[in-house]
Image: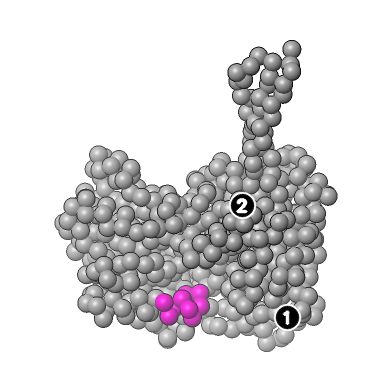
């Protein structure tokens, strides 16, 4: 394969060969055009002003996949200025919904056409199995298609007036520049879910992807460029962990940024919320979860086990809506564990680029250290490790064995905190009231799941479970049509659905007086 020359940030031959080994022979001259190592500001592919870069590595084997610019606040100011200029001076805010819809449809078509290459890039930098990457692309692309359609449905209202000589109207207008800060666990879908809604509304965007997974973001951006996005409408800045905090603070505090949308940890979300306060900036937060997964005695156990597998082990347990606490009623406790154990034993572990792999590595060393510490904490405090419980160094430094831990107590980290890993934490309960008390005894309220064939119980639990989303006899609940978001400390606002576009518009009240 020919050596890639990508400006002054050229990948050397060793890196190219490492990337090729990682994702096979699919990287040829036709498909390599999506592999970018520059950021994208004002319609141009650029490096950091400082000339600094940082490495992007493959968590499956820790090989370097490439380098991207390590941008600081000076570079991000350029991106903000570009987005602000595109919105006001180039009058993107005055573009028609029909034109924005057509542009998003073109982007969607290109995303669909290039889905295989995007999946390879995503698996290489995130570690998730290729089948899951392909699934995420279907999910992520659906938001572009959805908001292309919703762009033409941002309706206002005519309000009946109390005076006969007046006419009252409510219209919706785009709020301006939106700063989008996205996580590593869904490097495709979290960008499309936010950016397509903002652009459909008539906003411009500055996207800061996670430092672990910028290559997917840049691939999506290349296709946006090919779709014909005007200069400054979509900008992407990349930065290492060293600069992440200052970049986030600038996006929150810049007077030229009208809104922030962030998906990530509750701790970082709280900090961004504070930083937005001075400007009373519009903010959307999708934060950490601590999802209960309740199995009542009336449940269909076969369906409950399938739901548990789908909810817990997608992306190696590294999703914000993964089941975190498994509450199993006395009467079915042992049988559920037995059936679940057999399913988990059958999981294929390894490099996500290999056929049939279902469990890949965790994203980085901080994450595997956290998972290991949580399991060790439970063991030291008397929990029972039914299955797994160890790092799998024979596969690589970032692999952790799918695990079941039972006999949990409320002084254990597994009981109280989100683990973000392939660990099933079992809590036994006797009554419905006890299950609800345990499930709701947290300040997190993103998603929850329960299994029951008792119709009265289904309606009771659906009402009383304190989460923003609930899977009833279902472990996979995400869809573009659904309103995604949490309550309590799990976030503000909703993404997807007809409500997702509301995060990027404001309502203007018009009162026409003196009419005859």
The foreground one among 129 and 261 is 261
* Image coords of residue 5 (percent x, y): 78, 79
- The residue under the point 35% across, 81% down is 390
Quarter containing the C terminus: top right
Q: Is residue 246 above or below residue 262?
A: below
Q: Is 251 drawn above or below residue 153 in the view shown? A: below
Q: Identify the residue at horizontal 74%, vertical 16% (top origin).
A: 515
The residue located at (76%, 79%) in the rendering is 50
Specify whether 144 is left or right of 69. Answer: left
- Magenta stretch prevailing secondary structure: helix
Q: Nearer the viewer, residue 379 or 353?
A: 379
Q: Distance from label 2 to label 1 (Cα)?
A: 34 Å
Q: Can residue 365 be seen in this view?
A: yes
Task: Find residue 52 and name its label.
Answer: 1
Crowding near pointer 2: few (<14 within 10 Å), some, many (20+)? some
Residue 122 coordinates in the image, percent (x, y): 59, 68
Q: In which quarter of the image is residue 329?
A: bottom left
Q: Nearer the viewer, residue 148 or 466?
A: 466
Q: In which quarter of the image is the N terminus?
A: bottom right
Query: Can residue 399 be seen?
Result: no
User: From the viewer's perspective, is 166 left or right of 307?
Assistant: right
Q: Is residue 158 above or below residue 446?
A: above
Answer with the quarter of the image where residue 114 lies: bottom right
Residue 248: mark: none
Dot 2 falls on a residue whose secondary structure is loop
Q: Is residue 166 above or below residue 316?
A: above
Magenta residues span 361-370
Q: In which quarter of the image is residue 251?
A: bottom right
| Residue 45 falls left or right of residue 114 | right
x 68%, y 19%: residue:
166
């Amino acid at each position: 394969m020919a050596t890639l020359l990508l400006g002054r940030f050229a990948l050397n031959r060793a890196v190219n060969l490492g990337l090729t080994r990682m994702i096979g022979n699919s990287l040829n001259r036709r498909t390599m055009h999506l592999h970018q190592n520059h950021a994208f500001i004002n319609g141009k592919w650029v490096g950091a002003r400082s000339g600094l870069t940082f490495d992007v590595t493959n968590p499956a084997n820790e090989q370097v996949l490439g380098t991207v610019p390590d941008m600081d606040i000076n570079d991000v100011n350029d991106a903000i200025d570009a987005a602000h200029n595109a919105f006001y001076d180039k009058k993107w805010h005055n573009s028609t919904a029909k034109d924005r819809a057509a542009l998003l449809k073109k982007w969607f078509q290109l995303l669909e056409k290039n889905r295989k290459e995007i999946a390879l890039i995503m698996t290489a930098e995130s570690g998730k199995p290729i089948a899951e990457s392909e699934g995420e692309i279907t999910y992520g692309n659906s938001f572009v298609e959805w908001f292309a359609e919703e762009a033409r449905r941002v309706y206002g209202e005519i309000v009946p007036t109390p005076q006969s000589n007046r006419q009252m109207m409510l219209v919706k207008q785009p709020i301006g520049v939106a700063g989008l800060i996205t996580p590593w666990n869904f490097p495709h879908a979290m960008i499309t879910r936010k950016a397509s809604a903002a652009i459909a509304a008539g906003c411009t965007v500055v996207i800061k992807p996670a430092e672990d997974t910028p290559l997917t973001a840049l691939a999506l951006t290349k296709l946006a460029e090919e779709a014909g996005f005007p200069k400054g409408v979509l900008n992407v800045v990349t930065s290492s962990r060293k600069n992440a905090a200052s970049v986030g603070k600038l996006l929150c505090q810049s007077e030229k940024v009208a809104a922030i949308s962030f998906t990530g940890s509750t701790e970082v979300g709280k900090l961004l919320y504070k930083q937005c306060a001075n400007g009373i900036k519009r903010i959307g937060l999708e934060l950490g979860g601590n999802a209960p997964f309740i199995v009542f005695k009336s449940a269909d156990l076969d369906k409950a086990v399938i739901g548990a597998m789908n909810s817990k082990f997608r992306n190696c347990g590294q999703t914000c809506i993964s089941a975190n606490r498994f509450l199993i009623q006395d009467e079915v406790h042992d049988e559920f564990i037995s059936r679940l154990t057999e399913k988990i034993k059958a999981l294929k572990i390894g490099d996500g680029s290999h056929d049939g792999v279902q469990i890949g590595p965790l994203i980085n060393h901080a994450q595997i250290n956290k998972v290991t510490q949580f399991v060790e904490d439970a063991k030291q405090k008397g929990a029972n490790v039914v299955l797994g419980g160890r790092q799998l160094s024979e596969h690589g430094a970032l692999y952790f064995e799918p695990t079941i831990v039972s006999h949990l107590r409320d002084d254990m980290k597994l009981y109280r905190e989100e683990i973000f890993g392939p660990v099933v934490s079992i809590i036994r309960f006797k009554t419905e009231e006890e299950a609800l008390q345990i499930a709701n005894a947290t300040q997190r309220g993103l998603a929850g799941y329960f299994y029951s064939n008792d119709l009265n119980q289904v309606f009771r639990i659906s009402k009383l479970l304190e989460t923003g989303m609930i899977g009833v006899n279902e472990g996979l609940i995400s869809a573009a049509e659904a309103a995604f978001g949490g309550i309590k400390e799990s976030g503000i606002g909703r993404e997807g659905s007809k409500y997702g576009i509301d995060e990027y518009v404001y309502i203007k009240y018009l009162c026409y007086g003196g009419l005859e």
